[in-house]
Image: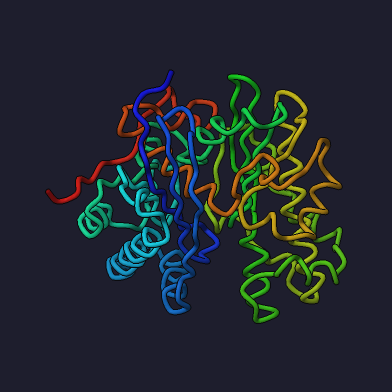
Amino acid sequence: MGGRIYRAIGLMSGTSMDGIDVAAIETDGERVTATLPGSTTPYPDDLRRRLSDAVRHPDRDAAAVERELTDAHVAAVKSYLKTLPEDHRTIDVVGFHGHTLLHRPERRFTRQLGDGERLAHELGIDTVYDFRSADVAAGGEGAPFAPVYHRALARNADRPAVFVNIGGVSNITYVDGNTMLAFDTGPGNALIDDWMEAHAGQPYDAGGATAARGKVDDKVLDQLLDNPYFARKPPKSLDRLDFSAAPAEGLSPEDGAATLTAFTAAAIAKSADHLPAAPAQWLVTGGGRRNATLMQMLAGRLAGKVEPIEVIGCDGDALEAQAFAFMAVRTLLGLPISFPETTGVPQPLMGGRLAKAAA
């Protein structure tokens, strides 16, 4: 039997920089007893540009954009609360991921933009933030962090199951019974998005339509895959800027999109080399599952069923935000959120800092 059920909101600003995901769950820190519909608040173009500039120049003073980012999260939560039934608007805790400015675990350093104290004060709700720093300081990779939530959801999946999250960076979680393994696989949508913005004047390849009109350049794909990261044993993690689309320069917009999409799929397929057993099911979440061309390429490269996570009753748009709601409750309860098998931390580790709302 579980203990007290908490209602928590989770917030996620992913490496794709498309907006703020907000979602609420009810949980005792081990089981998920209910999920509420999530929402996404797109970033205004000017904030997205300033956020992108801050990520590309992390040495600059980011105080102004951090405040603006925090206030955008405050507004997103207030708008979200208005969409909930009145009897669901009492929230015990908020899990505030912030936005990754720089992630360098090899230097035991990670920085997420987001002022948890300000958020807690403005919302009047206790807030857990800065989830990754304790893990990195202890020698962990500081990512991925959703696996503990994936484990809670895996009871509804065929096992061994792999959760594939395709955001700006792609990561996987392998779950089979009590066995859990997680790591970043390589690029997700980030290179495709950057290519589309530079070569087609579009923020992303909607539905994979541009890639579908192109042809994969196998020589360029081989060059992209010639990276020692893929052979490294997990746990391992990436920053959004660790891979470059430079080898694709000179290709047409369509061929470049096709080749970079194939790169994301091939990198995910290479992750199977590091798994203890062949997965029965690959459950795809994140924005990448809406790219039909990418999903088709994954199905062609992976053994086992490749399906969107909705087949087990989950909302793939809300999943990462839900994960940080789940971890916020675990932080309140003193339960670990990262593990040797997920981030490489020496032992299961609690994380996150608690900002109390003003009395």
- Figure disc tally: 0
In this picture, is 47 found above or below 284? below
Q: Residue furthest left?
A: 359
Give the x, y percent position of residue 201. Answer: 65, 81
State the quadrant of the N terminus: top left
Q: Is residue 345 above or below residue 21?
A: above
Place of residue 54 in the rendered image (x, y in percent of width and height, measured from the top left)? 41, 67
On screen, residue 295 above or below 347: below
Q: Residue at x 61, y 53 (%)?
A: 286
Residue sitting at 44 percent across and 43 percent down?
25
> Could you tell whether 123 is left or right of 289 in the image?
left
Please report the residue visible at 75 percent of the width from the left and 55 percent of the height from the top. 263
User: Is 148 in front, or is 108?
Assistant: 148
Which residue is farthest bottom?
201
Quadrant position of residue 114 = bottom left
Q: Position of residue 75 (x, y in %)?
A: 34, 66
Image-quadrant location for residue 213: bottom right
Q: Which residue is rendered at x = 22% and y = 53% of the image?
A: 124
> Could you say where residue 196 lies in the image, as x and y percent from the top left?
67, 73
Residue 163, quarter of picture: top right
With respect to residue 32, does 77 lie above or below? below
Question: In this image, 241 relative to 277: left or right?
Answer: left
- In-front residue for pair 123/163: 123
